[in-house]
Image: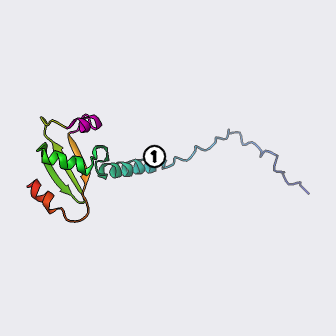
Amino acid sequence: MPSDPGPNQTPPSTGKQRRRPNPPVGNNWIWLLVLCLGAMIIWTSMPGARNAIHYSEFYKLLKDDQLKEVVQNGDRYEGEVKKDAKLPEELAKKYPKLSKFSVERLTGSDEQLQRSLN
């Protein structure tokens, strides 16, 4: 009876050299691209947190007529400071290059502010 080849025995050679199969090409780059696009969409849709100012600072700029334009965007006001605006010293220290900004609206009625904006 012939003995069975053991697991440590190599199979007989057919004369050709065996090649290792190439590693499978994964689709990881597609997932990386999707992840980067998702992060970019989230980052661009975020309100301007980098130029967020306090409501009191916004109100002072409004009263001093230092604003070029203000737009209400949901629960935020987004605006632009006039180019020749003289910012208060404290505000100029906090935001040395303040041109565009955003501020969160206060809850409740802001009819007086709406009238001031018009």
- Image quadrant occupied by the C terminus: bottom left
Q: According to the image, what is the colour scheme of the structure?
A: rainbow
Q: Which residues are magenta?
A: 88-98
Q: Which residue is mark 1?
A: 29
Image quarter of residue 84: top left
Classify 10 Å Cα crowding around label 1: few (below 14), some (14-19), many (20 and above).
few
* Pick the front one: 23 or 108: 108
Q: Position of residue 102 (x, y in %)?
A: 24, 49
- Image quadrant occupied by the N terminus: bottom right
* Pick the front one: 92 or 45: 92
Q: Position of residue 85 (x, y in %)?
A: 14, 37
Instruction: Determine whether, in the image, residue 86 is placed left or right of residue 25.
Output: left
Q: Write the residue at 52% across / 46% down.
A: 25
Q: Position of residue 66 (x, y in %)?
A: 13, 42
Image quarter of residue 51: top left
Instruction: Determine whether, in the image, residue 2 is placed left or right of residue 31.
Output: right
Q: Write the residue at 23% across / 65% down.
A: 108
* Pick the front one: 56 or 15: 56
